[in-house]
Image (cartoon, rainbow, N blue to C red):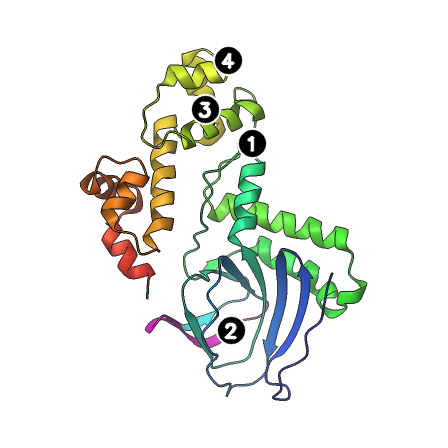
Amino acid sequence: MYRESANSPEPDAIRRSIVDASPISIIRLRSDREDLAPSPANTRDEAFNIITQLRDFRLHRLWRGKTLVFEGGHLKGALAITDLREEWRCHHLSPFDNVRFHLPFSHVRDFATEIGRPELLTLKCPPGTMDTVILGLAHALLPALERPRQASRLFIDQVTLAIVTHLAQKYGGLYFPGERKGTLAPWQEKRALEFMAARLDGHLSIMELAENCQLSRSYFIQAFKTSFGRTPLRWLIEYRIAIAKELLLQELPIAEIAIRCGFADQSHLTRSFSLVAGITPARFRRERRP
């Protein structure tokens, strides 16, 4: 269930401890050295790497592909989310101590589907973001990382669920209303989202959606907006764009991606993508792929 890894072959270079809470891996990395060699590139994987700093981290360099994307440090509590489908290399130039969570895409999507929120397709975190919630949860896991064989599976599962829920809300764009009055019931949320996700071309009406949820048209529109923080049309557009972002990381032509995501043609995708994401699909692809 859990394991503790052997330390680096170079004495005291990087100390590692791992808790394998499948499908999530929790890893603590730390070093007191100033002269570490650059790390090799990661193995590409269908997963996120979630990293929180346990202490101030003065200096490092980070490459995405062959491009240097960051040089500097992070304060204690800083959070980074990296998409491991891309190639990353890091050169640690000062002592550091962090906890990182290897989080498979499939687990994020299963979580989103289970709670009736299939629009969650990615996690976005600007560089330098401070997150005391993830820092606190990482600190709660330190005893388990020090003594993996004595760790409680129930406790680990509760903490990792809290982490995934927080990430989904804060960095995945999920909207959870604080007050359930006037919202859709869970079964209605699930039915409405599944219905829209199956109609990416937008060939559906509000009346169809309302009838599927056994509601009047006017009540459905208001309840949907209260539940999700956006209108059905806006939700569908953002969902299409989220799928397009996933496909843009592959080798597909942009015109084909447009059709797959329910847009009339490439120019239609470009207009909608630019409106939601602030950049064109072509630029998004150039910036995200090596």
Q: First in sequence, mark 1 or 3: give its number.
A: 1
Kindly report the secondary structure that dominates the magenta region of the rendered protein.
strand
Q: Quadrant of the C terminus?
A: bottom left
Label 4 amino acid?
Gln
In the rendered structure, does residue 68 fall within the stretch colored magenta? yes
> What residue sits right under mark 3 in the picture?
224
Residue receiving disc 2:
57
Q: Is residue 53 above or below residue 177?
A: below
CA gap between label 1 and label 4 equals: 24 Å
| Amino acid type of the residue tagged 3 in the rendering | Phe
Q: Residue at x 25, y 39 (%)?
A: 272
Q: Residue at x 39, y 32 (%)?
A: 235
Residue closer to the observer: 75 or 185: 185
Residue 57: x and y, percent? Answer: 51, 73
Boundaries of the magenta span: 54-70
Badge 3 marks a residue whose secondary structure is helix
Q: Residues within 10 Å of mark 3 (few under 14, many from 20)?
A: many
Residue under label 4: 214
Instruction: Identify the residue at horizontal 47%, vertical 82% (top origin).
Output: 93
